[in-house]
Image (cartoon, helix red, strand yellow):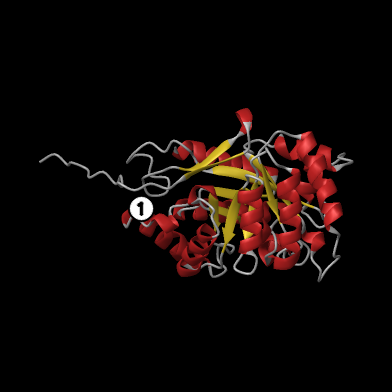
Amino acid sequence: MPFNGKSGKFNAAIRTVEIGTGDKAVKLGGECVAPLYSFDAPIENAPKVGVLITDHGFENESEGIKAYYEGCSNWGEIAQRAAAMEGADFLVLKFDKADPNGENAPVEDCLAIINEVAAATDMPLVIAGCKNAEKDAEIFNKAAEALQGKNVLIFSAKEENYKGVAASAVLAYGQKVGAESSVDINLAKQLNVVISQVGVDMGNIVMNVGTATAGYGFEYVVSTLDRVKAAALGQDDAQLQMPIMTNVGDETWAVKESTASEADIPAWGPVDARGVNMEVATAMAVLASGSNAVILKHPTSVATVSKLIKELM
């Protein structure tokens, strides 16, 4: 008896969210199948790869990342170098120095960098903050205003600041907004609901459900992503049908496997290679679990993950 395979195509679909403008604009989501299941139905918008740059520069980055940006003398050149990375679909600009518990860089300094980067490249932009909800709200408001018309993603609104961030980014300046929760499907859904109650159309929201590095409590990340996609597609839950973006680079380059020197642990091999392995493994795991876009740092990681995505599509 011949085998007749059952289609895994769902009647529901993930919403499509576009960031950027012109030929470089990218679309996230839109699929009606399980993650990477292109054999069940075409996936029109393949997962995307973003490149992370921060206002700290590259002093504390790996040798491979430093080498890639060698010779860049200003933020415009850094942005152009990042945009030229093989496999890059969008840029992520993160303002770690703005943290009031750290250097407390003023919002004006952040805005100057934003304007310089925006003038130097036409790649889609994602603006990330310093993880201080109050300071981030200030940064995001100014960034959304300065980048009006560029269709950027403000990444991200949290429970503590969603009203101001969502209203400013989407309603006032026509941008897209991220909804950031902490690896919990109920928290993710609740944040989507309250952001929509501010007046934001759910088609303008990208979820950031959080992540960890593979091997570091990563089963919680996988189970959350799986549950979100199962509810969105299998149960047609409209409040979870947003595409997901995951900041992998920040997590994976902070763990011991990516930072311990070769002199301290020679059996582990070169630091740079270890960091890339951790970044690629984590990125592909979250993509296979339901993320629609990953944010990475190392040029080798960006190129490798992009090639893997193309092979799987």
User: Relative to 313, is 269 above or below?
Assistant: below
The residue lying furthest to the top in this view is 23
Please identify the quarter of the rendering in which residue 251 is found: bottom right
Residue at the spot x=62%, y=37% of the render? 87
Residue 281 in view here: no
Please identify the quarter of the rendering in which residue 159 is found: bottom right
Residue at the spot x=50%, y=55% of the render? 285
Which residue is labeled 1 in the image?
Answer: 233
For the C terminus, which image quadrant?
top left
Instruction: Categorize mark 1 by other alpha carbons within 10 Å: few (<14), some (14-19), many (20+).
Output: many
Return the residue nearer the eye: 68 or 80.
80
Residue 218 in view here: yes
Residue at the spot x=86%, y=53% of the render? 109
The residue lying furthest to the left in this view is 1
Label 1 SS: helix
Please identify the quarter of the rendering in which residue 152 is found: top right
- Under mark 1, the amino acid is Leu
Return the residue nearer the eye: 262 or 290.
290
For the N terminus, which image quadrant?
top left
Which percent across, then down, holds residue 111?
Answer: 81, 49
Which percent across, then down, holds residue 55?
Answer: 81, 53
Which percent across, then down, holds residue 70?
Answer: 84, 41
Return the residue nearer the eye: 63 or 293.
293
Asked if residue 20 lies left or right of residue 259, the reply is left
Return the residue nearer the eye: 87 or 262.
87
Asked if residue 98 lies left or right of residue 151, the reply is right
Which percent across, then down, holds residue 108?
Answer: 86, 53
Looking at the rendered structure, the number of numbered marks drawn on it comes to: 1
